[in-house]
């Protein structure tokens, strides 16, 4: 309180010249209620503009008239609260009570209407992304029209209160516009365009906010004064001006209508829909936005750390696969085949629906069964020892660099219990399955496989049956034919995705993948394939581990010249005798696949995961920033063509040429606008200069020099009279006190500014010559002194 009084006393003596000073406490009167209600109109434009744009973009049906009336009355009431402090306190209490009572009495309708709008947004997202996955909220009221009207009216009142506090009183328009942008982001992303009326209202409200704030017309007081003194900014600002504000609102509304109307004529919606393309940034973010729209914020997160494929059977918690490409394992071996080499780490027996994980084989008591060597491996070993054709024996050294402790078993090895600890190295002996190699004496293993690896949960039976039917799988076909058919169906109908989105809460992993999401990575395809093969009678099991391709060996492998080939491989080799190589295996090699049982071959790998057509998620920060900004790639699609919208019809081509012409004209106007404005301001100043007498010319020249200096030294603006200004100029080296004495210069300027006597030409030249020619050197000299 004392500080404010002191400031008031200080600012009452702002001397312009000797005998003349300004009194900021003089403030004219104004009918403040008119201004308050006009501020309410501004809030009404903003709130109704945002809500109307959102609801009209989604084409939601409800009573628009009721919403307009409720929001308009609420904004007028909120704006009038600032007429007096007493009424503000009482009015807000009444409003709070009314809203609390409305929330209690109409809570059912408010919730149901809000859920209806959320369902409409989810439906629009599902249609845009061409996905069956859609979030659905339970609507408690059957009459959606009435429920949405009540809900949007109540939410609109809440928005009016918040916006009125931010805008009508303090003009915190940035927060309001940020909230508006967040609200309209999703409909605009889904290419849902709002109606013309609400676009005009939102544009007008936004422009008015910035214009009024820039003009100092904000921070309402509880006095009837039209002006107020801003001590920090050292200026007088308007607070209330109903006539000026009304004119400004009308002008901005008219300008907004004309601007958007002309824009619609030059660039109609039909033209935009025909020639628009999808930006690279939007392409890169499509699946992320789809995950959020379908799954909520959980669609952005991974719920367990390993996203390459090794999850020990845990499913559904990976939203986006991001590789770090750091070495997990380092293997050393002699290449013997041109096919992919697999290293098993986890074998899943029982799929637990809705718990979304595979469980290792257990006994009747639920205890995990120890891994056993398959008869398939035993038969391959025996065939090799007997010297049969197409048999071999190999060794692979596996060094655990940064992987979890576990078994990383090559096919077909008896070392099923040999775990590799981090930092340790273990050599596995295996007997490879080569082309044309058939086995005999597998009847006992076949019976065991049919007994242990045929279970399909009842909860997944319908989705798996539909998959088998769609892919053409049948028990009458061979195992190989069924594997090929399912792999082809996956490739043609369900895309591989590095960003599949996490499985929603209380959804089954396989059912969600097959019936709603319809995209995934290796764990999705392998899980569904395992159940599909079991459904048609083929024993199958889910497997996780690492897969190393021939190109990994040829491109990333290092030849070990000190190692002998014979120490790592014996027998038939599909690639002939080669050198021993070492290969770094990263998390990008982590994989999930299926093992199926063939009567003549035993357990075989069935990898049905389709080839990915999208880019891998790059974990580099700079790369991801560039991709987000649209600079991380070109704007062409995978087929080499440009983005969508390449219609070659004459009408579309003409529209394109017209839009390009308009764009060039707009760009040219924007480029030339700045120099034109600068030149125009200079011409206006010269026009005023030549029309003025000698006194006014001197003041114009003096003020212009002060303006240029104040651009570099804002502290100059704190000096209001000629004497203080000249003293400041002398101190900072901008005025030559030895050429023109300070007292004489003050006298000349006061004479030119406040007297009817005309300054002489000699006095005019004297003031102009008083300014230093080289301000920088003069300022430096003054600083050294």
Image (spheres, rainbow, N blue to C red):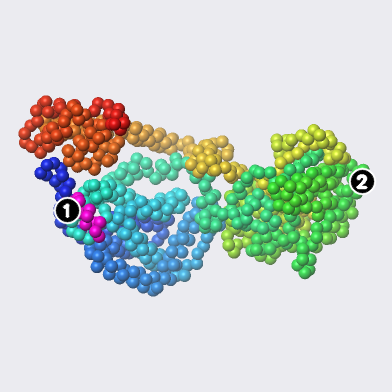
Query: Which quadrant is the N terminus positioned in?
Result: bottom left
Q: Is residue 17 magenta?
A: no
Name the residue located 32 percent from the left edge and 59 percent from the top edge. 165
Query: In x, y percent, where is residue 464?
Result: 67, 59
Residue range (magenta): 1-12
Q: Main secondary structure of the magenta part?
A: helix
Inspect this view and state whether residue 257 appears: no
Query: Which quadrant is the C terminus positioned in?
Result: top left
Q: Is residue 7 magenta?
A: yes
Image quadrant assignment for residue 155: bottom left
Which disc, if any, is residue 385? 2
Q: Nearer the viewer, mark 2 or mark 1?
A: 1
Name the residue located 15 percent from the left edge and 43 percent from the top edge. 16
Q: Secondary structure at mark 1?
A: loop
N-terminal label among 2 and 1: 1
Determine which residue is flagged by label 1.
25
Do the residues under discs 2 and 1 have CB atoms within 8 angstroms? Answer: no
The residues tagged by marks 2 and 1 sit, at their Cα atoms, a distance apart of 109 Å
**Residue sitting at the far right:** 386
Q: Is residue 15 left or right of residue 202?
A: left
């Amino acid at each position: 309180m004392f500080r404010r009084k002191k400031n008031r006393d200080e600012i009452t003596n702002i001397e312009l010249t000797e005998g003349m000073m300004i009194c900021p406490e003089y403030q004219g009167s104004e009918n403040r209620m008119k201004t308050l209600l006009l501020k309410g109109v501004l809030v009404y434009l903003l709130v109704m503009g945002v809500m109307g744009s959102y609801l009209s973009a989604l084409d939601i049906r409800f009573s628009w008239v009721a919403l307009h009336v409720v929001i308009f009355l609420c904004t007028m009431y909120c704006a009038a609260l600032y007429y007096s402090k007493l009424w503000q306190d009482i009015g807000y209490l009444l409003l709070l009570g009314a809203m609390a009572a409305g929330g209690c009495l109409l809570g059912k309708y408010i919730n149901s209407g809000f859920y209806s709008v959320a369902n409409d947004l989810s439906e629009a997202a599902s249609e845009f992304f061409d996905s069956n996955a859609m979030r659905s909220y339970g609507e408690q009221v059957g009459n959606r029209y009435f429920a949405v009207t009540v809900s949007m009216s109540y939410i609109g009142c809440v928005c009016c209160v918040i916006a009125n506090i931010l805008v009508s009183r303090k003009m915190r328009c940035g927060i309001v516009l940020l909230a508006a942008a967040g609200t309209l982001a999703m409909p605009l992303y889904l290419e849902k365009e709002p109606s013309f009326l609400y676009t005009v209202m939102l544009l007008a409200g936004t422009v008015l906010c910035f214009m009024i704030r820039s003009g100092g017309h904000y921070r309402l007081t509880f006095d009837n004064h039209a002006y107020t003194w801003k001590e920090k900014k050292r200026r007088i600002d308007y607070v209330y001006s109903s006539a000026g504000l009304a004119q400004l609102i009308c002008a901005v509304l008219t300008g907004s209508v004309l601007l958007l109307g002309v824009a619609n004529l030059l660039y109609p919606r039909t033209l935009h829909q025909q020639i628009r393309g999808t930006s690279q940034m939007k392409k890169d973010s499509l699946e992320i936005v789809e995950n959020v729209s379908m799954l909520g914020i959980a669609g952005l997160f991974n719920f367990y750390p390993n996203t390459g494929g090794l999850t020990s059977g845990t499913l559904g918690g990976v939203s986006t696969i991001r590789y770090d490409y750091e070495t997990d394992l380092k293997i050393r071996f002699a290449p013997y085949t041109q096919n992919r080499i697999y290293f098993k780490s986890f074998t899943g027996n029982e799929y637990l629906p809705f718990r979304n994980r595979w469980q290792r084989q257990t006994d009747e008591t639920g205890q995990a069964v120890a891994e056993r060597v398959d008869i398939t491996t035993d038969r391959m070993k025996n065939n090799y020892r007997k010297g049969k054709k197409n048999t071999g024996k190999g060794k692979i050294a596996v060094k655990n660099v940064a992987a979890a402790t576990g078994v990383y078993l090559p096919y077909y090895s008896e070392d099923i219990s040999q775990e590799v600890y981090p930092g340790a190295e273990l050599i596995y002996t295996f007997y490879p399955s080569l082309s044309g190699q058939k086995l005999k004496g597998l009847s006992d293993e076949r019976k065991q496989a049919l007994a242990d690896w045929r279970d399909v949960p009842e909860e997944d039976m319908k989705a798996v049956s539909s998959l088998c039917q769609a892919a053409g799988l049948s028990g009458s076909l061979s195992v190989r034919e069924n594997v090929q058919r399912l792999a082809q169906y996956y490739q043609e109908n369900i895309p591989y995705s590095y960003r599949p989105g996490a499985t929603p809460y209380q959804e089954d992993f396989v059912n969600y993948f097959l019936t709603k999401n319809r995209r995934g990575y290796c764990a999705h395809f392998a899980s569904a394939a395992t159940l599909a093969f079991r459904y048609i009678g083929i024993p199958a099991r889910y497997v996780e581990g690492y897969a190393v391709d021939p190109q990994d060996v040829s491109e990333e492998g290092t030849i070990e010249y000190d190692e002998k080939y014979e120490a790592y491989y014996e027998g038939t080799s599909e690639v002939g005798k080669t050198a021993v190589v070492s290969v770094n295996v990263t998390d990008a090699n982590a994989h999930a696949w299926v093992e199926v049982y063939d009567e003549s071959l035993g357990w075989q790998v069935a990898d049905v995961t389709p080839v990915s057509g999208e880019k891998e998620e790059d974990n580099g920060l700079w790369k991801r920033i560039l991709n987000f900004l649209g600079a991380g790639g070109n704007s062409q699609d995978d087929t080499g063509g440009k983005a969508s919208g390449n219609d070659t019809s004459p009408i579309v081509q003409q529209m394109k040429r017209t839009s390009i012409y308009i764009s060039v004209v707009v760009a040219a106007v924007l480029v030339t606008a700045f120099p034109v404005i600068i030149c125009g301001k200079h011409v206006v100043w010269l026009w005023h200069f030549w029309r003025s007498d000698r006194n006014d010319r001197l003041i114009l020249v003096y003020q212009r020099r002060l303006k240029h200096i104040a651009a570099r030294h804002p502290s100059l603006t704190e000096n209001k009279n000629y004497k203080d200004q000249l003293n400041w100029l002398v101190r900072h080296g901008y005025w030559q006190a030895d050429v023109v004495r300070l007292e004489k210069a003050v006298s000349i300027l006061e004479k030119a500014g406040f007297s009817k006597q005309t300054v002489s030409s000699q006095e005019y030249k004297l003031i102009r010559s008083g300014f230093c020619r080289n301000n920088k050197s003069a300022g430096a000299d003054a600083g050294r002194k």
